[in-house]
Amino acid sequence: MATKIRIGAMISGGGTNLQAIIDACESNAIDGQIVFVGSDKDGVRGLERARNHNIETFVVDYGEIIRTYRETPEKLFPPSDFDLDELWLKQSLFGPHADSRKVEFFLTTRAIAEKRLLEHMADYDIDLLVLAGFMRNLTPYFIDRFNVDPDHPRIMNIHPALLPSFPGVDGYGDTYRYGCKVGGCTVHFIDYGEDSGPIIGQMSFPISDEDSLDAIKERGLELEWHLYPTCIQLFAQNRLEVVTMTHTLDNNETVQRKIVKILQD
Ligand code: GRF
């Protein structure tokens, strides 16, 4: 029997992807087990799904942290190893012209939340963290403390669009409103940007003029439930290799990009 990897999952909502991953672990389609499910808010259906399978859960209430810091900042402290300038330089969620107070507020409140996430996770010794409908961007504070080896990223996300098109919170909505004739979903490793890390797998579906946004979401989600477990199993089998490619463009500029290669079984 293959050794099972230990998987942690973060969610924010209904958790249908989480359910697909739990089911795939239970049927051995994934050589792994989910050892915790964390959420950024309490009372969501995904937490109930986890408990139904005797998986431990925790909540780090991002909304509460953000409110408290806005109203009474003296009540919350950033972690002792928080370095605002370092995170600001590394992150690529905000451009150079972003409002500096906004960036500072964002990075500080997220680091407070992420420190709590790391404390909860410390007990579990996981191999892989999967973001399954987790609607928060992780900052370099968290990423660097969990992804200690940059050549072996171990935080995966699923996104409801064919990246790099339509990053952000409403991938299917953006695909629909743009009038795309094809939609899809993407599983990728996360990096310091928004939905910008190396792509592991994608699935697509056709869109006709008659399709409603709801129909597109439904079709996309069904593909997600297949794609995410497939990509996690590739990770469990140690078949994902991240390589840095250097390309020379027509104007002789060179660009570097990390991509994922899928090794043969
Ligand atoms: C999915 O469409 C996922 O791609 C996106 O959020 C949605 C979560 O759905 N990030 P669920 O909570 O897994 O049902």
Image: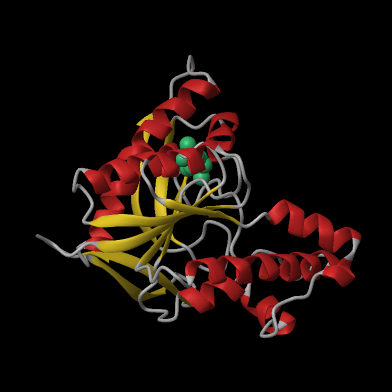
Picture residue at 67% right of the left edge, 54% below the top: 61
Viewer-closest of 249 and 214: 214
Q: How many labels does the image show?
A: 0
Q: With 121 as the anchor, is 113 left or right in this view?
A: right
Residue 178 location in percent, x, y? 58, 33
Q: Is residue 160 visible?
A: no
Residue 203 location in percent, x, y? 34, 41
Residue 69 appears in which quarter of the rendering? Answer: bottom right
Picture residue at 62% right of the left edge, 45% below the top: 42
Residue 58 vertical position relative to residue 133 in the rendered view, above or below: below
Viewer-closest of 194 and 78: 78
Q: With 79 as the anchor, is 203 left or right in this view?
A: left
Q: Is residue 113 visible?
A: yes
Q: In which quarter of the image is the N terminus?
A: bottom left
Viewer-closest of 246 and 113: 113
Q: In which quarter of the image is the C terminus?
A: bottom left
Residue 162 location in percent, x, y? 44, 45
Residue 194 vertical position relative to residue 126 in the rendered view, above or below: above
Picture residue at 37% right of the left edge, 64% below the top: 128
Colouring used for the render: secondary structure
Residue 184 location in percent, x, y? 41, 38
Task: Check the image and name the residue furthest to the top.
Answer: 210
